[in-house]
Image (cartoon, grey):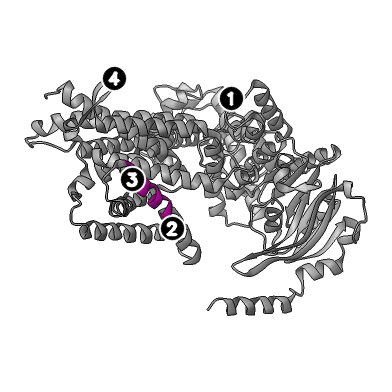
């Protein structure tokens, strides 16, 4: 299942990654390589560390150990090539901002943190809104958006970042069918442009239909590789079934002993 | 009322500057759901001042400032620590930290024998006596307090303006901000430090209570009125200024009119700010009580109006002439509604051209007939759909459809029609009219 591709074709390379919350491992010894231009599903049961894996990739959570390379370099030097879309519920949608304001946030880095935005930036933000199909909502206050429209707004904000690598945390959670379809359409367009897209996903039914590369994760990386090799009953059973009970027990014991 | 520019002008100016300085940073406290942190820091700076004084032995403002900044940051840090390791919610952690720090401050103050910190001054400030301490400036002699407040006001405005995008992004979406390489933690602590500095500068003029009020109330008022961040900040500063000026005005004019001797200006400023918040809560076009009440009233009038149309349509189904006139009393009896709201709703429908009024009562116009036909169509499609999908009893079917019909667009109707297989009659055997 390990792809032996050339180094230059690797978008993300993770070696020996371990992340722990209060001494309990959330991710344990993750090693994987994601080839450039793939549309990757990160799949696993609740609490398996899917979101944490994504956050650890871009240094949003502290690592116990391990290394992540994005497009051959350390994350800190590649931030301008990475667009991250957090979970929709992680922000306060009552914030006083219009849809266009939120999309423009994706351009802050490029436009400079201080200088005024140029009309060209505004055009690009509007074009991104058009691409996700909500250009008519540009001036709408964000508190008035439906869940699907919120997710589209976030996707538009990622699109304007002209990134090479896109990380989306549960973009399909609680959105309507039309939104889900248009998000996956946009992701496929990005893939056609050679971008690498990682998506935390939890609906097993749509996995083979949406993705061409799969990371099955349950604290450990159970399997990873092209979808046709990894999306197998045995792998799914390993991921969702026998919950690696021995490892669970030993870590629980470690935690109990540590907390006196 | 006696307004002396030499005195009241300076007091109003000091109040305004203080209110604006507080409101500027307060916006981000309110948006970060950290309103209580403002309260906490304003109390916790006391041990900061005391420690700075005990340690350095000087009463210089600068040392006190350093102490306040340190304690402001410690407050935020301790709160975060307790929240994380004590597994308690944020407000509980804040409650623990600031009361403990405040108590510590009181102890330190009472230990230091030659500290003259007057508790009432800490609470209410001393806006009335600021002109006693004048300093020369390039613009002429000014009260020291005014100079200090002008400095902190400009400082806060400058820091917010220079890092406006960082403040915005790290407030709205801290994870994304972090992913973009913004040091989110630095901004968090910087906000705490700015609140602490603002508090300590404002203390002498307006005291603790007004600082807390000015940090939170004008931004909260602006939040009710604004849809975007930049206007919210401007409006909060404007309201802060209005509250300061009108607060002082009423402090010198009101007491005489109601027979009191005097009122504290700082307290009156807080009162006016509170009144502005109340007005905003009532009249806000975004979420105000009044707007919601009006919308509710409009909706219930529309529903009643549509009920009249639907009733007249049903009458026309059984009696011969399609646009028959029915007496208003008969409609009122049938819809179980008194005459006055009925005639209001009827007038609305006449204005929309759906109803005509004759001596005998009301009749549908051709337009009204078409509108009513769609309502009845919605009603019966819903009954059919609900009976197919849910198997509700007949009585429940009717009452559900009765409320749903008023919210059903023609798109929704055609969708209902398709999913129920284009039925021609409803569960009660009544004809479902075609779309008009």
Which of marks 3 and 2 precedes in the sequence? 3
- Quick check: do tags 1 and 2 share a chain? no
Q: Position of residue B178 (x, y in %)?
A: 61, 46
In magenta, the rendered stretch is B62-74
Q: Quadrant of the N terminus of chain B?
A: top left
Image-based side of B118 in relation to A91, left or right: left
Residue B66's place in the image compared with A66, above or below, is above
Residue annotated with mark 1: A116
Residue B296 image position (x, y, % from top left): 43, 38
Q: Is residue B214 above or below residue B245?
A: below
Chain letter behind tag 3: B
Instruction: Check disc 4 and report the residue beneath it.
Output: B139
Q: Residue furthest top?
A: B139
In this view, the mark in front (4 or 3): 3
Kindly indicate whether the residue at mark 4 contacts the one at mark 2 (C-beta within 8 angstroms): no
Mark 1 to mark 3 CA distance (whole Å): 38 Å
Residue B73: in magenta span: yes
Secondary structure at numbered mark 1: loop
- Marks 4 and 3 share the same chain: yes
Tag 3 or tag 4, which sits nearer the N-term? 3
Instruction: Determine which residue is flagged by label 3.
Output: B63
> SS for tag 3?
helix
- The CA distance from mark 4 to mark 1 is 33 Å
Q: Report helix, strand or loop for mark 2.
A: helix
Residue occupying image coordinates x 59% and y 67%: A22
Q: For mark 2, what is the residue?
A: B79
Classed neighbour count for the residue bearing mark 4: other residues with Cα under 10 Å, few (<14), some (14–19), many (≥20): few
* Magenta span: chief secondary structure: helix
The Cα–Cα distance between marks 1 and 2, rounded to whole angstroms, is: 36 Å
Residue A256 seen? yes
- The chain identifier of the residue carrying mark 1 reads A
Measure how far apart labels 2 and 3 are at the Cα level.
24 Å
């Amino acid at each position: 299942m390990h792809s032996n591709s050339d180094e230059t074709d690797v978008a993300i390379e993770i070696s020996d990654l371990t992340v722990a919350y209060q001494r309990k491992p959330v991710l344990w010894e993750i090693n994987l390589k994601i080839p450039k231009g793939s549309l990757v599903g990160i799949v696993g049961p609740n609490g398996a560390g899917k979101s944490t894996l994504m956050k650890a990739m871009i240094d949003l959570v502290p690592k116990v150990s391990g290394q992540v390379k994005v497009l051959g370099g350390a994350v800190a030097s590649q931030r301008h090539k990475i667009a991250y879309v957090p979970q929709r519920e992680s922000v306060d949608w009552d914030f006083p901002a219009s849809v266009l304001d939120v999309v423009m946030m994706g351009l802050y880095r490029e436009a400079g943190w201080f200088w005024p935005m140029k009309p060209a930036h505004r055009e690009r933000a509007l074009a991104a809104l058009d691409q996700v199909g909500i250009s008519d909502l540009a001036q709408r206050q964000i508190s008035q958006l439906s869940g699907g429209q919120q997710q589209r707004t976030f996707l538009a904000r990622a699109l304007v970042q002209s990134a090479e690598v896109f990380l989306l945390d549960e973009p399909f959670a609680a959105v309507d069918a039309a939104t889900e379809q248009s998000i996956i359409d946009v992701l496929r367009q990005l893939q056609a442009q050679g971008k690498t897209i990682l998506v935390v996903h939890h609906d097993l039914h749509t996995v083979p239909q949406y993705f061409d590369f799969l990371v099955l994760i349950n604290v450990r990386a159970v399997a990873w590789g092209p979808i046709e090799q990894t999306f197998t009953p045995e792998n799914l059973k390993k991921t969702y079934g026998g919950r690696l009970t021995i490892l669970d027990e030993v870590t629980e014991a470690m935690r109990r002993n540590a907390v006196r | 009322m006696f307004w002396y520019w030499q005195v009241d002008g300076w007091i109003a100016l000091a109040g305004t500057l203080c209110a604006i300085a507080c409101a500027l940073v307060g916006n981000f406290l309110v948006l970060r759901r950290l309103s209580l942190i403002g309260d906490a820091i304003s109390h916790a700076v006391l041990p900061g001042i005391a420690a700075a004084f005990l340690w350095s032995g000087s009463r210089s403002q600068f040392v006190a400032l350093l102490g306040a900044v340190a304690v402001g940051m410690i407050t935020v840090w301790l709160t975060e620590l307790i929240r994380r390791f004590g597994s308690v919610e944020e407000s509980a952690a804040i409650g623990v930290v600031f009361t403990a720090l405040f108590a510590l401050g009181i102890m330190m103050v009472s230990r230091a024998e030659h500290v003259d910190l007057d508790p009432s001054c800490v609470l209410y400030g001393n806006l009335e006596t600021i002109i006693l301490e004048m300093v020369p400036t390039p613009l002429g002699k000014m009260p020291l307090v005014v100079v200090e407040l002008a400095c902190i006001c400009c400082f806060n405005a400058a820091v917010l303006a220079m890092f406006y995008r960082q403040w915005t992004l790290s407030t709205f979406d801290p994870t994304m901000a972090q992913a973009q390489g913004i040091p989110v933690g630095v901004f968090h602590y910087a906000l705490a430090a700015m609140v602490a500095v603002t508090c300590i500068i404002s203390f002498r003029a307006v005291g603790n209570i007004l600082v807390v009020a000015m940090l939170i109330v004008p931004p909260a008022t602006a939040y009710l009125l604004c849809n975007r961040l930049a206007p919210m900040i401007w409006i909060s500063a404007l309201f802060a200024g209005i509250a300061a000026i009108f607060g002082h005005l009423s402090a010198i004019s009101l007491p005489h009119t109601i027979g009191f001797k005097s009122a504290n200006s700082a307290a009156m400023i807080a009162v006016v700010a509170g009144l502005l918040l109340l007005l905003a809560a009532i009249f806000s076009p975004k979420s105000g009580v009044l707007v919601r009440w009006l919308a509710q009233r409009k909706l219930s009038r529309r529903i009643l109006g549509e009920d009249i149309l639907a009733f007249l349509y049903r009458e026309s189904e059984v009696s011969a002439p399609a646009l028959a006139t029915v007496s208003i009393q008969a409609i009122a009896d049938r819809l179980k509604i008194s005459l006055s709201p009925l005639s209001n709703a009827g007038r609305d429908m006449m204005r929309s051209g759906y109803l005509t009024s004759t001596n005998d009562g009301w009749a549908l116009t051709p337009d009204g007939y078409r509108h009513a036909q769609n309502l009845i169509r919605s009603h019966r499609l819903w009954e059919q759909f609900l009976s197919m999908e849910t198997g509700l009893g007949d009585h429940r079917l009717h009452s559900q459809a009765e409320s749903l019909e008023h919210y059903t667009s023609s798109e929704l109707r055609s969708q209902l029609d398709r999913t129920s297989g284009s039925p021609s009659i409803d569960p009660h055997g009544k004809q479902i009219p075609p779309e008009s």
